[in-house]
Image: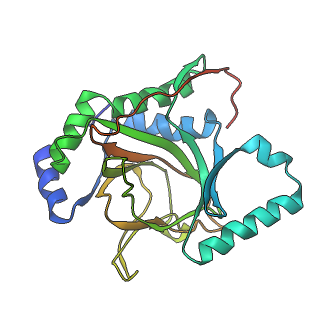
Amino acid sequence: MLNPNLDLSALAEQYQMKKRLRIESFLDAEVAGKIFQYCQESVKYNLVYSLNGQNSTMPMDELATLPASEKKEMNLEIMNAASKGAGFLYCGYMMDKVVETNDEKLQFLHEVFEFFNGEELISAIRTITGETSIVSADAQYTKFTPGHFLTRHRDVVAGKDRRVAYVFSATWGWHPDWGGLLQFYQEDGTPEDTWTPGFNTLSLFDTSYIHSVTYVTPFAQTPRLSLSGWFRGPANPVVAKEVWNIKSNLAS
């Protein structure tokens, strides 16, 4: 899966300059194309959001059954918190379960996650970042559509042993005016660097960076798709929590 033409030594030099790096053509192009396609066809996303200071998820079919008045009130509360610089709203599918499925597309997406935890990729990330004690990755597939966002924050959380944050972008044809930008900030909130969603790119950055995903505009014409998470040290390895039996009739 990993692009064999990557110059890991050169990438390591670039990463050490600012402790962040965007790598083009990270995986085999065919693999990236399948991720872009299958994330739209075979993933049953949950709505992921912050409400009243609590991180929450809701299956999309459950969201569809809520009365319009309840949806409106929930959205107003989410947006009110966001106006004060707190919260997030997007669609996500956590990679914290072992999956038994006859949906080959969904199985492929889980195989990609397994590859991100395999020795070939973990070794490459150790070389690039200099974080030699990285042992695993956690992740979720995310889909940002109009109205979605992730406000400014750092990824440092006590006890999680997050060493390096990553975003593998599998978004085709994204226009920067649509929002959904990975934005980095100075301590005073001044924007410092901005990366547009791309196709087959891996963004790596130190977890101490203040960053956000900017608001996706109403006129965005395609979803912002990615596999994102953290490369972790040995204090908090990734452990599969349960087994899902998933039928082939999963809808996007």
Residue 52 position in % (x across, y down)? 66, 64
* Residue 107 visible, this orientation: yes
- In terms of image quadrants, where is residue 73? bottom right
**In the rendered image, the vertical position of residue 120 relative to residue 79, given as above or below:** above
Quadrant location of the C terminus in the rendered image? top right
**In the rendered image, the vertical position of residue 178 relative to residue 186, given as above or below:** above
**85 left or right of 126 in image:** right
- In terms of image quadrants, where is residue 153? bottom left
Residue drawn at x 47%, y 47% is: 226
**In the rendered image, the vertical position of residue 53 relative to residue 192, given as above or below:** above
* Residue 182 visible, this orientation: no
Give whichever of 153, 143 is nearer the camera.
Answer: 153
Residue drawn at x 65%, y 62% is: 146
Residue 1 position in % (x across, y down)? 32, 31
Give whichever of 222, 79 is nearer the camera.
Answer: 79
Residue 98 position in % (x across, y down)? 50, 23
